Image (spheres, rainbow, N blue to C red):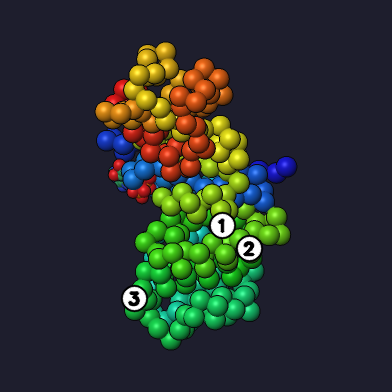
């Protein structure tokens, strides 16, 4: 299977913040969600993949090629959606498309028109007159109109209402059906990932927590609840983190089988959502 993205030991030192030796990779044809709390380093990583900022060390390959040496060739095949709208604000959508389409050999005007219609965008409008959701739709229409093989998106659904979000996810879902396109996108909305991601990469405070297949993650982590009387230090060691209150505890574990067999009906065990995994991992104290 060919790799569409390889991020190897990248580091960016901003002084107060350091993206520290982060590595992960994505195979062609798959969707990877990129999660982490505010300030974790998601945008920094995406900007380095797009060569918008310089890394201090490490290596990034896109389509098997170095992202700096082969920048022009790589970008031709990438659809990029960024949370800050980088179009000409004073120009109409039509004029923006006219200018930007010239940069792409594979510009597909038919597809562009279809997406503009589908999103009910009015081409005469200036970019600055669009709402946040409309800007996102325009960005997506542009990103999907040059036969990109790889979509990279920084928070494409942030600040959008559930109807817009669901429309965007439906469109992405259609786009990946041919198994040739790959998608890498950051988000805070973990429920979006439960729908469409094959892999999840999670960073916290500049460090990689994990980069794994989603199904494996969903099978590995569980939430366990129980009464205070059973929570001794041995049991505490089975948890990634625990919240305690006056009645009992709730904790995230990768060890639910053993806990179940030791404590039987004294505990309630359920699958953890991605949000639970993120919150407990970030919250991170064993004895709250
Ligand atoms: N140009 C810069 N100079 C100094 N520090 C920076 C710069 N850009 C980002 N940072 C810092 O790097 C850290 C990571 O920021 P980044 O935008 O990558 O996080 P993020 O995970 O995308 O967060 P969010 O979810 O809030 O968008 C933050 O502490 C931020 O203040």
As drawn, 127 above or below 165: below
The reply to whether dot 1 and dot 2 touch (C-beta < 8 Å) is yes
The reply to whether dot 2 and dot 3 touch (C-beta < 8 Å) is no
Q: Which residue is mark 2?
A: 175
Q: CA distance from mark 1 to mark 2?
A: 10 Å
View quadrant of ligand 1? top left
As drawn, 69 above or below 262: below
What x and y, as percent, mark residue 183? Answer: 58, 53
Work out whether residue 212 can be spotted: no
Q: Secondary structure at mark 2?
A: helix
Q: Residues within 10 Å of mark 2 (few under 14, many from 20)?
A: some
Please indicate whether residue 256 sits to the left or right of residue 286 in the image.
right
Q: Residues within 10 Å of mark 1 (few under 14, many from 20)?
A: many
Q: Which residue is mark 1?
A: 151
| Quadrant of the rendering where the C terminus is positioned | top left
Foreground pick, 263 / 154: 263
Residue appearing at x 40%, y 69% in the figure: 133
As drawn, 228 above or below 16: above
Cβ of mark 3 under 8 Å from ligand 1: the answer is no
Q: CA distance from mark 2 to mark 3?
A: 28 Å
| Quadrant of the rendering where the N terminus is positioned | top right
Q: Secondary structure at mark 3?
A: helix
What x and y, as percent, mark residue 202? Answer: 47, 39
Residue appearing at x 50%, y 54% in the figure: 192
For marks 2 and 3 on the same chain, the one whose residue lies earlier in the sequence: 3
Please indicate whether residue 205 sits to the left or right of residue 264 in the image.
left
For marks 3 and 1 on the same chain, the one whose residue lies earlier in the sequence: 3
Cβ of mark 1 under 8 Å from ligand 1: the answer is no
Residue appearing at x 58%, y 53% in the figure: 196
Q: Nearer the viewer, mark 1 or mark 2?
A: 2
Please indicate whether residue 256 sits to the left or right of residue 147 in the image.
left
């Amino acid at each position: 299977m060919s790799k569409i993205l390889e991020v190897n030991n990248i580091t960016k030192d901003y002084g107060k913040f350091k993206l520290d030796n982060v590595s992960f990779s994505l195979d062609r044809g798959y969707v990877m969600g990129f999660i982490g709390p505010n300030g974790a380093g998601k945008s920094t990583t995406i900007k380095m993949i797009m060569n918008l900022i310089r890394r201090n060390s490490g290596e990034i390959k896109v389509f098997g090629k170095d992202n700096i040496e082969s920048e022009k060739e790589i970008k031709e095949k990438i659809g990029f959606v960024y949370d800050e709208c980088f179009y000409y604000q004073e120009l109409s959508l039509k004029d923006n498309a006219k200018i930007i389409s010239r940069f792409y050999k594979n510009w597909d005007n038919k597809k562009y028109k279809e997406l503009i219609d589908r999103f009910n965008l009015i081409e005469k409008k200036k970019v600055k007159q669009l709402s946040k959701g409309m800007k996102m739709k325009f960005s997506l229409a542009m990103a999907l109109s040059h036969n990109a093989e790889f979509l990279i998106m920084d928070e494409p659904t942030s600040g959008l209402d559930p109807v817009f979000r669901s429309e965007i996810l439906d469109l992405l879902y259609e786009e990946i059906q041919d198994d040739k396109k790959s998608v890498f996108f950051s988000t805070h909305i973990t429920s979006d990932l439960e729908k469409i991601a094959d892999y999840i990469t999670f960073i916290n405070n500049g460090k990689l927590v994990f980069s794994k297949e989603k199904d494996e993650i969903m099978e590995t982590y569980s939430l366990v609840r129980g009464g205070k009387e059973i929570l001794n230090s041995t049991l505490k060691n089975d948890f990634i983190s625990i919240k305690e209150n006056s009645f009992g505890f709730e904790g995230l574990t990768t060890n639910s089988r053993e806990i179940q067999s030791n404590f039987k009906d004294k505990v309630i065990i359920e699958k953890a959502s991605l949000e639970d995994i993120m919150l407990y991992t970030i919250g991170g104290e064993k004895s709250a």
